[in-house]
């Protein structure tokens, strides 16, 4: 299951520069004018996980297959997008197709780069886009409800959907994004409505190179906003990330990061945060041919996890032989782990844990 994230933001916030760095490509044109990205650019990026490399080295795996995350660079939104301003309707439809939103906010001052509102104010910028998404959601609900209410008179199953849409409309009219309803309504039902403000969000504060390690007053305000919403933020400098993406030597990258007092690239933080945004975790299958990371939803049972590899694994599931990544690496090999009796045998009711190294036994 591959997570698909849409990168959004006002024009000239560093969105396309960030996308280029994420994908180490120049497919998205980074230019100092609005709407330089008319069609969404898509990049598939491996999820950084040092555990996979260590497991592969330990097992002598010939091939490493990481998990991947898909990023979509969606053209800059502007005020009035919900009414079609700046090709807004087209851009909003692209957001509808993603699982999560990466909202890039300009948190740097630069007189050479114009701001669409003439002043750097990331909190206001965030509110502008959030308002446009809420207006679009209200419009969608208002279009759906009349016909649904008629059908619900003869179909009781639809009555629950009517009630949920009315709850959503009330929240939006009160100025609350639909993410605020999580924990109060059925999350699967809410997600199935495909409304924009129900999608989880990660705020990315784009700062100057000199502020990448510490942030600044702008990013602090975004952090306060995110905390109030129960959201997360990542602080990056898109210029630094662009420079790092051009370095091929790992030692060179580490030295460059160290010179800036950074422990890891901001892009790694974004990818990891985006991957965990939907409560996704990882398990591993390790062998001499390949070391493979697999993505699963938190709370998944062993048969469902087996089905991610192949549907036959789930249909014919017998048992799972499991050891934690930490134990596996500490012991040194799977053969030794079996000798020591450290490979647990788990059945159909086993809840998968992040970092599990697994062999699934099945019969079809």
Image (cartoon, helix red, strand yellow):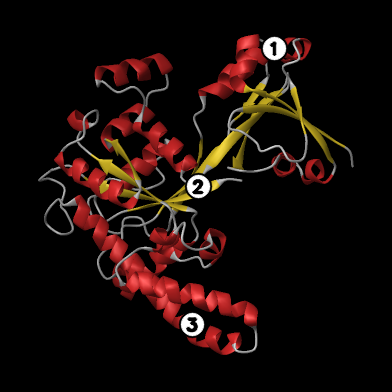
Please, what secondary structure does the residue beneath circle 3 have?
A: helix
Query: What residue do we see at 55% from left, 75% from top?
Result: 161
Q: How far is mark 3 from mark 1, CA to CA?
A: 59 Å
Query: What residue do we see at 50% from left, 60% from top?
Result: 97
Can the viewer see residue 23 in this picture? no
* Image: 77 above or below 261: below
Q: Position of residue 72 (x, y in %)?
A: 45, 51
Can the viewer see residue 310 in this picture? yes
Query: Where is residue 349, by image quadrant?
Result: top right
Query: Where is residue 129, by image quadrant?
Result: bottom left
Residue located beneath label 1 in the image? 333
Please, what secondary structure does the residue beneath circle 2 have?
A: loop
Name the residue nearer the viewer: 143 or 182. 182
Query: What residue do we see at 59% from left, 85% from top?
Result: 152
Query: Where is residue 91, by image quadrant?
Result: bottom left
Q: How far is mark 1 from mark 2, CA to CA?
A: 32 Å
Q: Earlier in the sequence, mark 2 or mark 3?
A: 3
Residue located beneath label 3 in the image? 145
Question: Which quadrant: the C terminus?
Answer: top right
- Labelled pair 2, 3 in contact (Cβ < 8 Å): no
Q: Position of residue 206 (x, y in %)?
A: 25, 41
Asked whether, in this view, residue 147 is left or right of residue 84, the answer is right
Query: What residue do we see at 37% from left, 37% from top?
Result: 21
Q: Which mark is residue 278?
A: 2
Q: Position of residue 67 (x, y in %)?
A: 57, 35
């Amino acid at each position: 299951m591959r997570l698909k994230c849409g990168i959004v933001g006002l024009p000239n916030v560093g969105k396309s520069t960030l996308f280029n760095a994420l994908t180490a490509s120049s497919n998205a044109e980074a230019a100092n004018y609005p709407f330089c990205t008319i069609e969404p650019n898509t990049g598939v990026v491996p999820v950084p996980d040092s555990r996979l490399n260590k497991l592969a080295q330990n097992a002598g795996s010939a091939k490493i297959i990481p998990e991947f995350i898909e990023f979509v660079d969606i053209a800059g939104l502007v005020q009035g997008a919900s009414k079609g301003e700046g090709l807004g309707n087209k851009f909003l439809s692209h957001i509808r197709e993603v699982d999560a939103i990466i909202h890039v906010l300009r948190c740097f001052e630069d007189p050479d780069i114009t701001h669409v509102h003439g002043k750097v104010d990331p909190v206001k910028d965030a509110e502008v886009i959030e308002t446009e998404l809420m207006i679009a959601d209200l419009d969608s609900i208002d279009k759906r409800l009349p016909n649904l209410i008629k059908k619900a008179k003869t179909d009781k199953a639809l009555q629950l959907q009517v009630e949920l849409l009315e709850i959503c409309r009330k929240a939006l009219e009160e100025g609350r994004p639909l993410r605020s309803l999580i924990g109060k309504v059925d999350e699967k039902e809410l997600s199935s409505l495909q409304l924009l403000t129900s999608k989880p969000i990660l705020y990315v504060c784009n700062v100057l190179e000199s502020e990448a390690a510490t942030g600044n007053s702008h990013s602090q305000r975004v952090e306060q906003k995110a905390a109030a919403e129960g959201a997360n933020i990542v602080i990056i400098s898109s210029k630094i990330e662009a420079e790092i993406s051009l370095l091929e030597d790992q030692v060179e990258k580490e030295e460059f990061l160290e010179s800036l007092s950074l422990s890891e690239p901001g892009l790694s933080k974004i990818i990891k945060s985006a991957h965990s945004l939907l409560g996704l975790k990882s398990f591993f299958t390790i062998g001499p041919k390949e070391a493979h990371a697999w993505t699963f939803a938190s709370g998944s049972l062993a048969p469902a996890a087996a089905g991610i590899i192949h549907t036959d694994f789930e249909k014919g599931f017998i048992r799972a032989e499991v050891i934690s990544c930490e134990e596996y690496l500490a012991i040194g090999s799977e053969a030794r782990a079996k000798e020591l009796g450290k490979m647990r045998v788990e059945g159909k009711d086993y809840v998968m844990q992040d970092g599990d190294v697994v062999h699934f036994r099945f019969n079809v």
